[in-house]
Image (cartoon, helix red, strand yellow):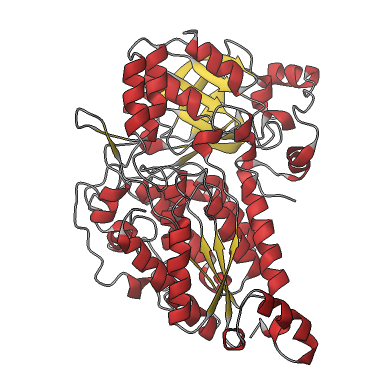
Amino acid sequence: MRSDNVKKGIPTAPNRSLFYALGYTKEELERPLIGVVCSHNEIVPGHMNLDKIAEAVKAGVRLAGGTPVEFPAIAVCDGIAMGHVGMKYSLVTRDLIADSTEAMAMAHQFDGLVLIPNCDKNVPGLLMAAARLNIPAIFCSGGPMLAGRLPDGRRTCLSHMFEAVGGYYAGKLDEDGVREYEENACPTCGSCSGMYTANSMNCLTEAIGMALAGNGTIPGVMSARLRLAKHTGMQIMELVRRNICPRDIMTEAAFHNADTVDMALGCSTNTMLHLPAIAHECGIELPLELSNEISSRTPNLCHLAPAGETYMEDLDRAGGVHAVMAELTRKGLLDTGVLTVTGKTLGENLEGAVNRDPQVIRPIDNPYSSDGGIAVLKGNLAPEGCVVKRSAVAQEMMVHTGPARVFDSEDDAIAAIYAGKISAGDVVVIRYEGPKGGPGMREMLNPTSAIAGMGLDKQVALITDGRFSGATRGASIGHVSPEAALGGPIAFVQEGDVISIDIPNFSIQVQVDEAEMERRRAAWVCPEPRIQSGYLARYAKLVTSAARGAVLE
């Protein structure tokens, strides 16, 4: 066993003495040591229940003959971090989580890992760690939140809450109306109830083969989640026994499967950052352009919030991610021969998977659209690409041309939006918010929600070198690469320039001739970094383009 390095033979007697100080017995040390990486904390609603999940996982490990050893991972609540300097610290935690988990697992020589995440950067950070360490590992997340319900009976969620703020500034809601959303949008523990980033990534743990069925969709308040956790604890022992490791599972074919499921589900655009970063840890390059190729042959089968009126609990009731994958296999869109954490192939796992509600999961012959939920656009404004959640864009905004309204920070843009200075037809451009320029690549849920709440989401587009929450809807185009801080063309856009967006044809152009762009480029001076000390300053020096997943080098 790998853990023999810290517990077997006379040379490790000092190590064993420290295990005895922890209360472990000789009998426990004779079993495989399983690290249980738990992201429990008291600031993230999606993580407040993870102590219960960890206890269930540890029970499963013990039932299957292992010794569980719990240690923590950090997590940020993107909703609480939204709209202020705290959002600069969200994406950057993905790498902190991967690095700290690697350090703990290597220092203590665990034989296997059960990873217990739930929210946005926690899931990809732990997947990156699992790939990097390449010791037997399996995921058991905390589960999604139930949808809220307003006093009049309408269901609601966090994206409605943010849009309610925009409605207030537009005079459509008073303070009492906002308070109704405030008190009802987030009724339980769990990752917020729509197909936002956290739930997107938790669903993709199933699609990529690193979690048992139901991991992405069983609500956090359900006892079925605890049973799943116990079975996950048992299954890590099988993976250790057979020495099945993450890179045996997370192959190139598995990433293509995950990208396909992403398109069918209509996941968050943040998956276009995280999947390439996880693949990078596996030694696999996942170019951004591949997404359009996969999207072109993958129907969009689900319209969960914010794209529609269904929620994660509905997807779970309809059969979950496995039911979606079963639909995709009807057209041969998945590689069913790939290995998964069950020790079986994906095809074997999908035997018996049934779509129980064709209103929630459209049959593959009756999709919402014939292509997938995310599109990658390119053009002279984004030579390396940018991304949009196509499934959440109104039909009338699929093609749009309008004047640029240019802001050098999210703060300036949101002030203008709240002040009513954005008009129908405008294209809001927010720059210097990329991985380096931010630094940290803030999510732009406040401005997009304000635009939607004011009723302008079918008339106004928003473009940024930052990124968007999975809760964003509308023609919100993020990850513009190269970013402004690297001298990308977005840095040279001026107020009033005409910008043309053509999502069906994957195009984004600023209607300024190349000679004028060159003149502007020659006159451009990069602004001083906004933050010049601490972790963010170090991050800015190491981070790469969003087109590469914002990995560190």
Q: Position of residue 252 (x, y in %)?
A: 53, 64
Q: Position of residue 289 (x, y in %)?
A: 54, 47
User: Residue 412 sits in which quadrant?
Assistant: top right
Residue at 39%, 73% (x, y): give it.
Answer: 231
- Above or below, 34 against 224 in this view is below
Q: Position of residue 485 (x, y in %)?
A: 72, 30
- Whether residue 454 appears in this view of the structure is no
User: Residue 209 sits in which quadrant?
Assistant: bottom left
Q: Is residue 89 left or right of residue 124?
A: right
Q: Is residue 300 left or right of residue 51?
A: left
- Whether residue 95 appears in this view of the structure is yes
- Above or below, 411 against 541 in this view is above
Q: Position of residue 80 (x, y in %)?
A: 52, 34
On the rendered image, what quadrant is the N terminus found in? Answer: bottom right
- Above or below, 201 against 368 in this view is below
In depth, the one of 79 and 264 nearer the eye is 79
Residue at 24%, 49% (x, y): give it.
Answer: 362
Report the number of discs.
Answer: 0
- Above or below, 428 against 380 in this view is above
